[in-house]
Amino acid sequence: MVVASHTQECLNQPPSEKATTLQLPVIDLSCADRSATSRLIVEACEKYGFFKVVNHGVPFDAITRLEEESLRFFSRTGPEKQRVGAPNPFGYGFKNIGFNGDLGEVEYLMMDGSGGSSSPDDETLECIPPDHRPDNLRSAARAYVEVVRGVACEILDLITLTEELLGAPSLGGMIRAEGNDSVLRINFYPANGGGSADVRPAASRAGGGDDVGLGFGEHTDPQVLTVLTSNDVGGLQVWVRQEAGDGDGDGDGGGSGRGWWTAVPPDPTALWVNVGDLLQAITNGRFESVRHRVVLTTSSKPRMSVAFFGAPPLDTLISSPNQLHHQPVYRPFTWSEYKTATYSRKLGDSRLHLFRRCE
Ligand SMILES: O=C(O)CCC(=O)C(=O)O
Ligand SMILES: [Fe+2]
């Protein structure tokens, strides 16, 4: 999938095309019929690469505690926040998303999401004076990772119940494995896109739109699966391919292929799941990793989101089971190789095509 990078030019500029609204799939994880749930998840992954999860079992308290502690952290002064170190890989970043010049109106914290007993960011924190250490935030993040990782594994286990994947190596096992490379990212987008509502360009105001800038540029997540939660401030948009949706937009807004940017209505009680690039490769392209972005609005409240990115240990070989292909689309590769390819490119750049087999 070719993904256009719109990020650079768009800092503080709302994207020109408007998002449509569309009913996105909702999965009830408490449903006792696991095969029916499995079918619904597979259908959602094939059609949208994205779905909402309700009755997921993550206690609302765990989410609100993490949000409150995160808000406390992001309310500190810039120099205080920077004391936790740059996000390399764990730490605090702002405006620069990643290492290759991508910019967004976002502050973020990268934390270990592996659920392992000793976490690499413990060492990073050793050098920070105790009164600057976000200890409460870290314990809230650990508690949250514990449960959200379980949800990610359950969803992956449900996917492997489908006939074609029966007998394939367990997808959930990849994220449960000792040494899994999962991470937690807490995003904080300023109210009013970081300025007053009047920062909107005239064209946007004339159109009656309330978008004020780009929080997080268009991209796909490189890992297996992302589980996202946010507060009640919207901004997330997903790209729905024309074959999947019945959107009423003009259908050629961004990236490759025809489709629509679709606004995801915020729901702090729900989780949202994105198919990542690795899952696209494992399913031989049957699932498509979803392109998404965050467009800031005139909300007087900051948007906060917490993304759990489920990833296997670095040396895990990514390949699709025989049942899923006559012709494998991608050559086998390790997560480590893929990660290197991802982090040496820009946020919106296409990466999976580098791993396609030569025809
Ligand atoms: O803030 C959001 O809703 C999305 C963030 C995101 O896409 C990411 O952290 O990869
Ligand atoms: Fe993302």
Image: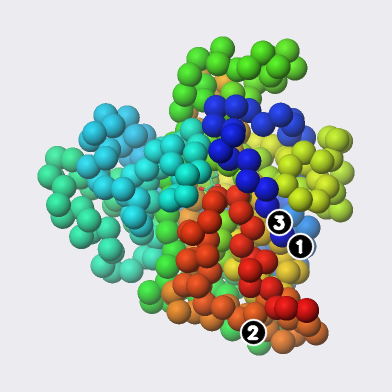
Nearest to N terminus: mark 3 or mark 1:
3
Picture residue at 80% right of the left edge, 84% below the top: 326
Residue 232: image quadrant is: top right
Residue 18 shows up from this direction: yes
Q: How far is the residue under mark 3 from the one under mark 1?
A: 18 Å
Badge 3: few (under 14), some or many (20 or more) residues near its Cα, within 10 Å? Answer: few
Picture residue at 14% right of the left edge, 40% below the top: 131
Total labels: the figure holds 3
The percent coordinates of residue 333 (x first, y second) are 56, 78
Classify 64 as above or below 325: above
Residue 260 relative to residue 155: left or right: right
Residue carrying label 2: 168
Q: Amino acid at mark 3?
A: Val
Please tell me which residue lies in front, 33 or 256: 256
Q: Quadrant of the N terminus?
A: bottom right
Nearest to N terminus: mark 1 or mark 2:
1
Q: How far is the residue under mark 3 from the one under mark 2?
A: 28 Å
Q: How far is the residue under mark 1 from the one under mark 2?
A: 18 Å
Residue carrying label 3: 2
Query: Considering the numbered disc 2 on the image, is that residue within a helix, a strand or a loop?
Result: loop
